[in-house]
Image: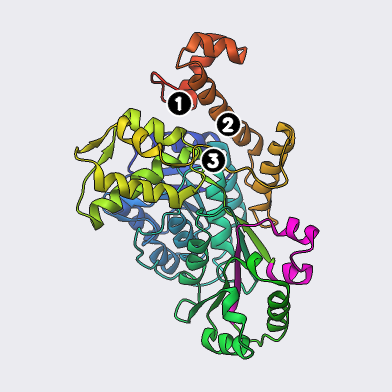
Amino acid sequence: MDGTVLVADDDRTIRTVLTQALTRAGCKVHATSSLTTLMRWVEEGKGDLVISDVMMPDGNGLAALPLIAKLRPGLPVIIISAQNNIMTAIQAAEAAAYDYLPKPFDLPDLMKRAARALALKRRMPQPATPPRSVGDDLPLVGRTAVMQSLYRLVARVMNTDLAVLITGESGTGKSLIARAIHDFSDRRSQPFVVVRASDLTEGEAPSALLVRAKGGSLIFDEIADFDDETQARVVRMLDGLAESAPRVIATSQSDLTQAMEAGTFRPDLYYRLGGVVIQVPSLRERVEDIALLAEHFLTRGARDMGVHRKLSGPASEIVRAYSWPGNVRQLENAVRRLLATSAEPEIARSEIEMMLRNQPAVEPQRAGHDGEKLSAAVARHLQRYFDLHGGVLPPPGVYARILREFEAPLIEIALDATAGNQAKCADLLGINRNTLRKKIAELEIRVTRRRKLM
């Protein structure tokens, strides 16, 4: 690599790591913990690339992007942020950041992106606009790789005219993603119209819905529930769309490919709706996000209900171990119930166990996967990970990233099964006890006295 990189982050460790890595790669580096200093360097003409955190002691890195673009058109900016939610990804895309990486980031991956930015020295495709202020009401938060990929895909497609099909289990947040695509797109000032099967029973309903939606977004909610006659009407409706027509989005908790094979869903409708397919993962597929979501709902409860609570360590472990068949919606309702019933500032494990006695304890069986081999299940999830990138290759380092995703839950489940006994766990896994300890430290696995949730 060749060039000068400006690094802005209030974390001294991150500044040191990036400075050392970039210097070894052949770059000159200026590092600072101040956004004011960064902007002075930019104004002075320093730097061929900026790597900046979002939350700085004296400002917001995202909010500074329009000014950077004005002062230095074409200067690429890579945003790194611990605020790992869909809003950050969308704001970074809107503000024309060259790239966005969540913390903790993979250093080799960041170095490759930095090398591409320095080599390309591309100009921004359009003037940057200030990111809109957003609330924190959207529970699309998560640090797992699958959610970060989903955020990037949403950010890439939100201003296209392609139809979007959002699939996933009930309660995963499909409607929230549809709303986010509309609210953060160029169509946000136009209507957002949700269409259910019952809305298409009247003869003039399709044309009336198009008039109501104008140039906004038309959302077909749970499209798999539409009968064959209604599906045919939707096909004719989509075939007659004009240039100023609304953007089409559909949601479904059913597997539409299986529905087509069963003859209950029209292939011609599927291909009209599936311009981009966004698969929303269940909570079981992103276990590391469960505690993060619980804290998000506790924070919201403090604001909305005036009740300040936190989970004790053992309570958090129980929340994380439960399968949550109702996904994010079930978790949110459970947290709100705990906020209303808990009398102590810290929610105890016993309160969680009592609440979960009345909840389903076994995750629902996915249709069509009975008796599925582990290798087939792994292949299915890996294919979904690649599909989430919308035809674009995932970031480099897939091998190590995927191994880490599988390694952490394997060790955690083995620890649960052996009640936290590391000697038994190492024997169960067939690895040396020192190796197990090293893996626990590397993967940041919390070690407590564990007991399986019955």
* Residue bearing the label numbered 1: 445
Q: Earlier in the sequence, mark 1 or mark 3?
A: 3
**Which residue is located at x 46 percent, y 22 percent?**
441
**Which residue is located at x 54 percent, y 86 percent?**
214
Three-letter amino acid code of the residue under disc 3: Arg
Residue 269 in magenta? yes
Secondary element at image label 3: helix
Question: Would residue 156 appear left or right of 378 to someone viewing this image?
Answer: left
Q: How many marks?
A: 3
Residue 16 — which label? Answer: none
Viewer-side residue, 7 vs 366: 366
- Asked if residue 418 shows in the view, the reply is yes
Q: Which residues are magenta?
A: 246-273
Q: Earlier in the sequence, mark 2 or mark 3?
A: 3
Secondary element at image label 1: loop
Place of residue 289 in the rendered image (x, y in percent of width and height, measured from the top left) = 46, 42
- Asked if residue 80 shows in the view, the reply is no
Three-letter amino acid code of the residue under disc 2: Arg
* Residue bearing the label numbered 2: 404
Residue 8 in magenta? no
Q: CA distance from mark 1 to mark 2?
A: 12 Å
Is residue 349 shown above or below 131?
above
Question: Would residue 454 appear left or right of 389 to someone viewing this image?
Answer: left
- Residue 315: name its quadrant: top left
Q: Are marks 1 and 3 in contact (CB under 8 Å)?
A: no
Residue 284 — which label? Answer: 3
Place of residue 263 in the rendered image (x, y in percent of width and height, measured from the top left) = 79, 63
Q: Are marks 2 and 3 in contact (CB under 8 Å)?
A: no
Q: CA distance from mark 1 to mark 3?
A: 17 Å
